[in-house]
Image: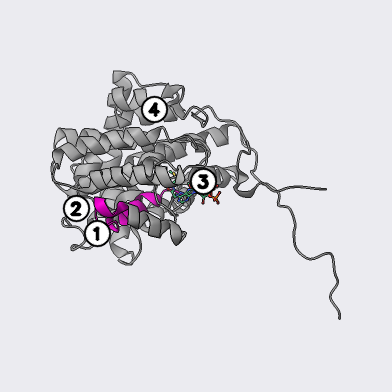
Amino acid sequence: MAYRAKKGLEDIICDSTAISDSIGETSELLYRGYPIEDLSENCVYDETALLVLEGELPSKERLILFRKQNIAIRQQVAPQMKLLDHLPASLSPLKKLSIAVLALEENSNYQADEVILAAMPLLAAKICTQIPAGTFGPTVFNPQLDEADTAKFFLESMLNKPMPEKAVAAFDKTMTVYAEQGFNPSTFTARIVTSTRGDVYSAISAAIGALSGSLHGGANQEAIKMLRSVPSVAEVDSWLAHQLKSGGKLMGFGHRIFRNGDPRAPLMKRCRDMLARLSPASPLPHLADALEIAVYREKELRPNLDYSAAVAYELLGLPDEIFTVIFAVARTAGWLAHIKEQKTNNRLIRPMAEYTGPEKRHSRP
Ligand code: ACO
């Protein structure tokens, strides 16, 4: 049989989904039919998470109930998080999250997916406060467990201080933008684990592993490191010429589907700009803009969502090591929705490979 393997499964449609639609040609992303521009303008993350998970935007009553449930679950989980104190300090925050999610337990009151969704920001916030002082100031973990709004709870628990309303609103929008995007590598990983009848904790833990790499979610951490290595706006061109000559990737640029531009990138930039107005002295947004222009001129590459998200999180005073963890927390809604969809009409995901090894041969006795 003559196969021609499609490297990276580019353009391969391997199943259907009703959760989101990524339209490369027109640079559009819709969650359950709603353009992400609408959702980031008019809805908060908790509403978007419910939309992604349940298929419709929640009524006021449903939202209140959901938030009450999240509070109750977090209050139950909080005393059970000792595991995180016993993991090696050298483990990356993302690996800690991947382990901690496996140790969560459902109980008679709540299902596994409800526990995971509510607990992820709590676990992630605790992990954030374990990042050594020096790279990051606050190390006290004192979450306000009665806070109903997930983005506010998550941000303020990580930073261990109340945050201005506008900062919370910008952070909330970044979570909405990160919430879901089709059969991306981490979501596909979660669907594969689910297709084997693996449990939801294992599927989410595996998805976190897939997200960690710098070609996927790890890019937001790498983007901030890259931007820091650009000495100044005046030196953007020479820095870029050197980078391109050495064949280095430009982190936070390019996308497999959104070749004409990632529709999430301008939304993330809007969040970044909301935060930049709160920290007007930071040179980072100007530097990022200058590099974006130069990269397009030299390579015709456009930024993806991770590029401005990295600057937004830096402006919030968050440590680099937590950037991808935030992505994981926000994307949990998407992962869980896909796990549910996979379960609903499951068939084992089991592709084939084109064999390129030696011809048939025999061993000698
Ligand atoms: N820096 C430099 N060159 C790039 C970049 C980049 N960031 N992205 C694409 N290119 C180049 C490739 O080298 C290739 O050039 P060539 O044809 O001369 O070989 C061309 O553009 C086409 O790129 P592909 O490699 O075919 O893109 P692919 O779809 O395989 O990869 C990816 C997409 C992984 C996102 C890539 O653009 C990349 O590595 N970007 C940097 C990492 C990143 O930001 N990842 C986050 C993606 S968004 C997300 O996961 C949430």
Residue sitting at x 79%, y 66%: 358
- Mark 3 and mark 2: span between their CA atoms? 32 Å
Mark 1: few, some, or many residues within 10 Å (few <14, many ≥20)?
Answer: some
The residue identified by callout 1 is 130
Q: Earlier in the sequence, mark 1 or mark 2?
A: 1
Which mark identifies residue 185?
A: 3
- Mark 1 and mark 4: span between their CA atoms? 33 Å
Q: Please name whichever residue, 226 or 350, is drawn nearer the observer in this view of the structure.
A: 226
Q: Earlier in the sequence, mark 1 or mark 4?
A: 4
- Mark 3 and mark 4: span between their CA atoms? 20 Å
Q: Secondary structure at mark 2?
A: loop
Mark 4: few, some, or many residues within 10 Å (few <14, many ≥20)?
Answer: many
Mark 3: few, some, or many residues within 10 Å (few <14, many ≥20)?
Answer: some
The magenta region covers: 216-236
Q: Please name whichever residue, 159 or 110, is drawn nearer the observer in this view of the structure.
A: 159
Which mark identifies residue 36?
A: 4
Residue sitting at x 22%, y 33%: 169
Q: Secondary structure at mark 4?
A: helix
Q: Earlier in the sequence, mark 3 or mark 4?
A: 4
Residue sitting at x 47%, y 48%: 207
- The response on whether ligand 1 sits within 8 Å of label 2 is no
Q: Position of residue 157 (x, y in %)?
A: 21, 46
Count of numbered marks: 4
The residue identified by callout 2 is 141
Q: Position of residue 347 (x, y in %)?
A: 65, 38
- Mark 2 and mark 4: span between their CA atoms? 33 Å
Between circles 1 and 4, the one closer to the viewer is 4
Q: Earlier in the sequence, mark 2 or mark 4?
A: 4
Q: Is residue 307 left or right of residue 186?
A: left
Q: Is residue 165 magenta?
A: no
